[in-house]
């Protein structure tokens, strides 16, 4: 008969993909019961009832326990950490500044979109990726955290508008093209220049995450300011579960700068999930292609970071013109080559992120059998 210690040792291979530590160390293994026949039931405590990575734990725990000699069947059940336990977890993680439990609890995936330098098309890709995720049936919010160069309101036709506040004192995001949107620009006078210092920024971003009624979302995309700095630091403290998508152009120089952003993300423990290349050549109406910004920078950066390149978005005039007109191109012209590339990237992003919260029975007994495939495949063209 397997022992409890053997099971706990085996469970150390199950890593929480958001917190980057194993579930034993995080105190998330609530109980281990072993029958005389070798059937093992493990209860895992989650941080929120609708935890989107429940399926990941189910598969990981099952295959880890099955690997222990003498185990004949595995059952995985779930419950939720108490508030006191969650505080303990925060301490383990050394993140005293984290958002209170429950903030963003209904948001399944937070994806920060960043770049090493400005002008590479980060905001354009953010709004169009949001529209592309929506076209895949996802509910999506966009948070414009580009405090120095906010352009999301203009790109979604929301310039000059202000969000309302609910009776519960929550900020109601504006809606455009079915997307929920909050931008620092909504709270400033047109073209007002603001000098943001660390603490002020921290406060504003905390409020955007905590006091905005985001509701249920499959994805919250956050448009970061270019470069490395205070905003990314703040977000990594507030959102340890966020992942980071890096935008670069094919140019060698851009790739070098983007690498710096990646190093910073790594330093503050934001998981880099993918690279997307923008401005990947221009094709004339007669079909002649010009690699205006060079070739291959996105793939080189992705290889270096060991993450997938989810898309290569060409330069097209409609992408620029629609951004200027406040309409995501993807929503109105899905056949444009840029739209197609962005929709491809959205499908890649979906493949890389866990599914929306799924309801699992409290105790789901899985018979030991052949190991389940754990990885996921990324649809690439
Ligand atoms: N693939 C593309 N084809 C054509 N125009 C593009 C493409 N990508 C971006 N642009 C245009 O390039 C300009 C810069 O893009 P955008 O504002 O999205 O960059 P950014 O990286 O967010 O810049 P910043 O960080 O300074 O806000 C915009 O006018 C945008 O419409």
Image: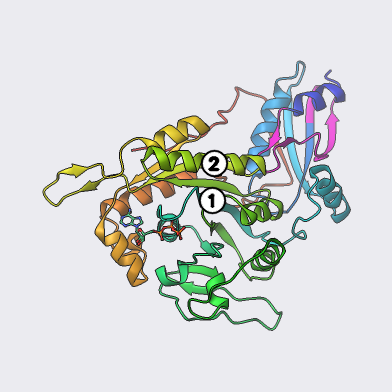
Which residue sits at x=58%, y=52%?
Answer: 109
Q: Secondary structure at mark 1?
A: loop
Image coords of residue 121 (percent x, y): 40, 55
By what rule are the colours in the image chosen?
A: rainbow
Image coords of residue 156 (percent x, y): 42, 70
Q: Is residue 5 magenta?
A: no
| Magenta-tinted stretch | 13-40
Which residue sits at x=57%, y=31%?
Answer: 374
Q: Is residue 288 left or right of residue 147?
A: left
**Which residue corresponds to mark 1?**
227
Q: Nearer the viewer, residue 254 or 347?
A: 254
Answer few, some or many: residues within 10 Å of disc 2's Cα (few below 14, many 20 plus, some between 14 and 19).
Answer: some
Tell me: residue 337, above or below residue 214: above
Task: Indicate which quadrant contains ligand 1.
Answer: bottom left
**Which residue corresponds to mark 2?**
260
Examine the rendering and report whether any part of residue 8 can be seen: yes
Examine the rendering and report whether any part of residue 136 can be seen: no
């Amino acid at each position: 008969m397997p022992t409890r210690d053997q099971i706990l040792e085996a469970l150390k291979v199950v890593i929480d993909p958001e917190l980057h530590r194993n579930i034993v160390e995080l105190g998330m293994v609530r109980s281990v019961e072993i029958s005389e026949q070798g059937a093992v039931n493990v209860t895992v405590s989650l941080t929120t009832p609708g935890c989107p990575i429940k399926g990941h734990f189910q598969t990981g725990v099952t295959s880890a326990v099955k690997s222990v000699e003498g185990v004949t069947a595995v059952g995985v059940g779930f419950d939720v950490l108490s508030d006191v336990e969650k505080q303990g977890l925060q301490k383990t993680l050394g993140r005293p500044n984290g958002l209170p439990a429950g903030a963003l609890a209904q948001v399944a995936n937070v994806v920060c979109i960043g770049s090493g330098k400005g002008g590479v098309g980060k905001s354009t890709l953010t709004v169009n990726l949001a529209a592309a995720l929506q076209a895949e049936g996802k509910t999506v919010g966009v948070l414009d955290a580009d405090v120095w160069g906010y352009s999301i309101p203009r790109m979604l036709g929301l310039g000059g508008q202000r969000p309302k506040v609910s009776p519960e004192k929550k900020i109601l995001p504006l809606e455009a093209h079915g997307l929920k949107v909050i931008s620092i620009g909504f709270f400033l006078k047109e073209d007002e220049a603001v000098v943001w210092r660390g603490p002020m920024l921290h406060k504003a971003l905390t409020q955007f995450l905590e006091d905005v009624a985001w509701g249920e979302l499959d994805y919250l995309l956050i448009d970061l300011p270019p470069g490395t700095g205070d905003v990314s630091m703040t977000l990594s403290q507030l959102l340890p579960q966020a992942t980071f998508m890096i935008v670069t152009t094919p140019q060698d120089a851009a790739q070098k700068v983007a690498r710096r952003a990646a190093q910073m993300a790594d330093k503050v423990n934001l998981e880099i999930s993918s690279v997307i290349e923008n401005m990947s050549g221009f094709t004339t109406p007669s079909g002649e292609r010009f690699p205006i910004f060079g070739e291959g920078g996105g793939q080189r950066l992705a290889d270096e970071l060991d993450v997938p390149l989810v898309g290569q978005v060409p330069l097209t005039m409609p992408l620029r013109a629609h951004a200027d007109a406040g309409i995501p191109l993807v929503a109105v012209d899905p056949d444009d080559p840029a739209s197609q590339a962005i929709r491809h990237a959205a499908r890649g992003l979906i493949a890389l992120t866990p599914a929306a919260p799924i309801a699992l029975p409290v105790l789901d007994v899985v018979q030991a059998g052949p190991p389940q495939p754990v990885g996921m495949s990324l649809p690439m063209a």
